Amino acid sequence: MIAILRKSAPREAVESLISWIQDKGLETHVSHGENETIIGLVGDTTRIDPFLLESMDIVERVQRVSEPFKKANRKFHPADTVVDCGHGVKIGGGHFQVIAGPCSVEGDNLVRIARRVRAAGATMLRGGAYKPRASPYAYQGMGPEGLSLLREAADELDMPIVTEIMDPRDVQTFIDHRIEVMQVGARNAQNFPLLKEVGRTRTPVLLKRGMSGTIDELLMAAEYIMSEGNDNVILCERGIRTFETRTRNTFDLNAVPVLHYLSHLPVVADPSHATGYTRYVEPMALAACAAGADGLEIEVHDDPEHAWSDGAQALTPDQFDRTMERIRAIRSVVAPSGDDRA
C-alpha cells in the first residue's frame, strides 16, 4: 500500500503520519519527489483501514500495490535510484557506466588489462577472485589474494571494483578489502542467506538474474537485499537458459525496459555471459545501450586463448577499444536529454 500526500502537506504532519503508521507495526518507505511525497507501507497492511488513511487531510489518495516486491517497486519510489559506487562513479538516473576486466583474476596481467580498459573509457573494474564453477575440479579463483590484486589495480587507476561474492562468511573479507560493489552471480540469485547478509551492509550490490529466473524473481531477490536496509542495488540482465543452443544463454533484452517500468533501480546488461562468444558481444552491447541500459559489464582479456576461464567470450583490449567507440556513438543518439555521459 502507498499513500500519496498532498503537495501542501506540512512537514510536521507528515512526520506525525509516519509515526502513526509505524505505531501500527508497519515499516514506512518515504520518497520525496518534485511534485509529491509518497509513503510506502510495508508489512501487514490489514492493520490500517485504507479509507481512514485516505480521509486524512494531508493524504491525496491511497493505492494498493499488488506486486510482492515493495521497496524495489517504482510505485514506492517513482524517481530513478542513483547508486554511488565510489571514486565519483554513479549509476542510474542518467549516469551510464561500463564495467570491464577479465572473467577471473589470474595475476599480474590484471593491471595491464585494467590500464587498457580504463584508457578506452571503462569506469569500473571487474574480475572474479571467487569463481562459481559447474565442476569442482575447475579453477575456483584466487580468493583473498585475488581481492588484493583487484584492490591494487583499482587504487592505481582510481576505479571502483566489481567482484563476485559467493558465501555470506566472506562479506567481512570483502569489506576489509574495500570492495566497492559486491556482485551476486546468477547461481546465487536465490541464495537467500547471502542476499540477506549483503543487505546488512551499505555496499552496493550488482545482482544478476538467475539462470532461469523470471523478472519477478530477480526483483524479489533485490527485495531480500533491500529489506535488510541496503537500497544500493543494481540489477543485471545476463541472459537466461532456454532451449536455444547457438549462444551460451538467451539475452533477454526485453528485461531492460520492463525492469525500468517496474522498478526504480539501475539496470546493467552483460552481453559477455549472455552470448558466450566474442563475435556477439559488441552487437548485443550496442543493442543493450539502445534498449536503455544504465551500464554494461564486458569481459576483456589480453590473451583470451589462454584465459583461465571464459576466454571464448572475452574481447581483446583492441576489440574493446573499438566497441567503446561504437558505444559512445549509440549513447550520443539514445542518451536521455541532459545526460552527457557516453
Image (cartoon, rainbow, N blue to C red):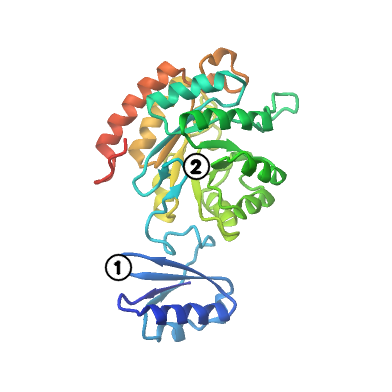
Q: How many marks?
A: 2
At horizontal 54% and vertical 19% (from top left) the residue drawn is 312
At horizontal 62% and vertical 55% (from top left) the residue drawn is 200
Classify residue 143 by image quadrant: top right
Amino acid type, residue under disc 1 in the picture: Asn
Q: Residues within 10 Å of mark 1 (few under 14, many from 20)?
A: few
Image spot of residue 104 (x, y percent): 60, 26
Image spot of residue 96 (x, y percent): 37, 40
Determine whether, in the image, residue 264 is placed left or right of residue 70.
left
Determine whether, in the image, residue 193 is placed left or right of residue 24.
right
Classify residue 317 by image quadrant: top left
Image spot of residue 65 (x, y percent): 47, 67
At horizontal 46% and vertical 59% (from top left) the residue drawn is 73
Tell me: residue 334, above or below residue 101.
below
Q: Residues within 10 Å of mark 2 (few under 14, many from 20)?
A: many
At horizontal 42% and vertical 27% (from top left) the residue drawn is 118
User: Closer to the camera, 72 or 99?
Assistant: 99
User: Closer to the camera, 255 or 197?
Assistant: 197
Q: Which residue is mark 2?
A: 236
Choose mark 1 or mark 2, whichever is in front. 1
Residue at disc 2, secondary structure:
strand
Q: Which residue is mark 1?
A: 35
Where's the C terminus, which quadrant? Answer: top left
User: Closer to the camera, 243 or 316?
Assistant: 316
In three-dimensional space, the C-alpha distance between marks 1 and 2, rounded to whole angstroms, equals 30 Å
Residue at disc 1, secondary structure:
loop
Amino acid type, residue under disc 2 in the picture: Cys
In contact (CB < 8 Å): disc 1 and disc 2? no
- Earlier sequence position, callout 1 versus callout 2: 1
